[in-house]
Image: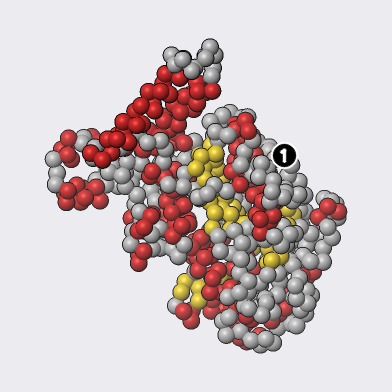
């Protein structure tokens, strides 16, 4: 039954149904379609630093001096697919069996597609989007040079390499971007946090504190209204206390209290104004997300566990229920136009893979990029493809990982890494050099980062970049921000080093 049909016939008839009939009636309702009037940036912070060189790998090569030989010979412990040192046949068997080979912009690579030995398939949505040329793989992006988690996570969220973990007042690059949107025609634009707690990415200036909104529990969002208190006898004491508090606040707002003073613009008046705005937004959200008339689709509620209001954990579609809940929050936000969400902040932890990397990160990559997993499910909902056409998703962490695996079957913190950008208007392809000749000789040395032999970022200029010089956060964040705004954006405090790699596309050409 269509939602509009339910509303047409009204709630009167519904009230007379038995509880069983009501449950059956509600289950027959269709969830409202997703919609997005403006462009949307979805920022997915992968806390701990994902090893994207586990997801995207070179084709094995029999030549001992090649990158394809060096990689597979030094990744036998993280790969764990029956691969052996100095055994090209074992590498080629694993690559042919478990990786989808693709060639973009003259560069050939494999994307992890499964674990045949465990009868598992991985990353089908990502592979399909790469083939549709909707995925940009940005190589050699300089992440944090620090090995400290708190420092590095602040750098990734602010885009400022000089950030300190103690500088909690530094705006996040998402907050800085929403400030610039606010100065344009999109004056009521908001950044919504789907995670709890809200990440520093959302931090904004003191003049825009109303722009970040916590949306980590979408179906219980907002202020408590009298209709939400229920009619049970034990709730009456609390209702009376709230009523008395509201009465006091109204007297203060109207200046009739002896404590109000002479000023008509007292602090309480400003508070009342903000309260009214929030109350209006509360009504908009609760009306749009009424569980009776607009239930979450079964696929969406299957993304998070029953203890958080989702379906039975045995039917969960992804391994990380907390992230599944964030996807459900995002799904709900896309049904409330008055939120005017222009930026969505999500966070997925658990990527610090110092040991047992294969067992830990492969299922996590599939949570993000798999068929019938988080984002594939989201964009399969009614209206989802229209939203996707106007959306950019960015996936990155605070660290890179080192080139060579360690003795525990993991990889340690590094500096360089990929950033993966997906979206309907993204010009797909490889940006930069995926498997650099400069890196291949460092595999045998241990403890070396991607791009370990490059010069300092600060000495890099547009004219002297080589195939493995880093681009940095600033160039990518500013480019994404300019797309979101529809005009040029320069985020304050964020350096923007160009990348003119001849082997790949330019970051400035990221969007069609």
Q: Position of residue 296 (x, y in %)?
A: 34, 49
Vertical placement of residue 298 versus 391, above or below: below
Name the residue carrying label 1. 492
In the picture provided, is 109 more to the left or to the right than 242? right
Q: Is residue 120 visible?
A: yes
Vertical placement of residue 378 versus 289, above or below: below
Q: Position of residue 316 (x, y in %)?
A: 38, 63
At x 38% / y 48%, what residue is drawn? 382
Instruction: Decide which of 347, 96 is in the foreground and name it.
Output: 347
In the picture provided, is 321 more to the left or to the right than 444? left
**Which quarter of the rendering shows the N terminus?**
top left
Q: Is residue 141 visible?
A: no
Q: Position of residue 421 (x, y in %)?
A: 60, 54
At x 45% / y 31%, what residue is drawn? 278
At x 47% / y 62%, what residue is drawn? 320
Q: Position of residue 39 (x, y in %)?
A: 54, 41
Vertical placement of residue 107 versus 385, above or below: below
- Label 1 sits on a secondary structure element that is loop
């Amino acid at each position: 039954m269509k939602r509009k049909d339910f509303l047409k016939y009204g709630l009167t008839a519904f009230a007379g149904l038995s509880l069983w009939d009501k449950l059956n009636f509600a289950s027959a309702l269709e969830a409202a379609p997703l919609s997005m009037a403006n462009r949307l940036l979805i920022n997915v912070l992968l806390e701990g630093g994902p090893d994207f060189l586990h997801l995207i790998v070179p084709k094995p090569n029999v030549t001992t001096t090649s990158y394809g030989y060096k990689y597979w010979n030094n990744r036998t412990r993280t790969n764990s697919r029956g691969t052996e040192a100095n055994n090209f046949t074992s590498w080629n068997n694993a690559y042919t069996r478990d990786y989808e080979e693709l060639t973009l912009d003259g560069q050939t690579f494999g994307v992890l597609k499964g674990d045949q030995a465990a009868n598992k398939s991985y990353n089908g949505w990502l592979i399909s989007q790469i083939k549709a040329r909707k995925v940009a793989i940005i190589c050699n992006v300089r992440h944090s040079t620090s090995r400290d988690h708190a420092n590095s996570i602040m750098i990734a969220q602010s885009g400022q390499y000089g950030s300190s973990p103690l500088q909690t007042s530094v705006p996040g690059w998402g907050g800085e971007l929403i400030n610039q949107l606010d100065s344009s025609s999109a004056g009521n634009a908001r950044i919504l946090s789907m995670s709890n707690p809200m990440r520093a990415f959302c931090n904004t200036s003191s003049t825009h504190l109303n722009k970040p909104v916590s949306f980590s529990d979408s179906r219980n969002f907002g202020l408590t209204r009298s209709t939400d208190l229920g009619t049970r006898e034990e709730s009456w004491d609390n209702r009376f206390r709230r009523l008395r508090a509201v009465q006091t606040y109204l007297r203060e707002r109207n200046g009739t209290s002896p404590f109000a003073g002479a000023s008509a613009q007292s602090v309480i008046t400003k508070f009342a104004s903000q309260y009214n705005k929030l109350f209006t937004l509360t009504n908009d959200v609760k009306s749009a997300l009424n569980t009776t008339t607009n239930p979450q689709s079964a696929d969406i509620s299957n993304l998070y566990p029953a203890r958080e209001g989702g379906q039975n954990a045995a039917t969960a579609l992804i391994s990380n229920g907390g992230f599944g809940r964030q996807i459900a929050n995002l799904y709900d936000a896309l049904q409330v136009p008055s939120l005017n969400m222009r930026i969505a902040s999500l966070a997925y932890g658990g990527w610090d893979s110092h040991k047992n990397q294969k067992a830990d990160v492969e299922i996590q990559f599939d949570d993000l990029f798999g068929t019938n997993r988080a984002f594939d499910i989201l964009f399969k909902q009614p209206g989802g493809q229209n939203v996707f056409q106007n959306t950019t998703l960015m996936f990155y962490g605070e660290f890179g990982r080192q080139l060579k695996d360690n003795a525990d079957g993991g990889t340690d913190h590094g500096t360089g890494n990929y950033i993966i950008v997906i979206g309907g208007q993204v010009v797909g392809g490889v940006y930069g050099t995926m498997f650099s000749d400069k890196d291949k000789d460092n595999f045998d040395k241990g403890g070396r980062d991607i791009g370990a032999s490059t010069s300092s970022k600060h000495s890099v200029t547009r004219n002297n970049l080589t195939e493995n010089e880093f681009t940095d956060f600033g160039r990518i964040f500013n480019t994404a921000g300019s797309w979101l705004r529809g005009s040029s954006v320069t985020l304050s405090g964020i350096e923007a080093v160009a990348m003119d790699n001849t082997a790949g596309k330019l970051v400035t050409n990221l969007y069609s």
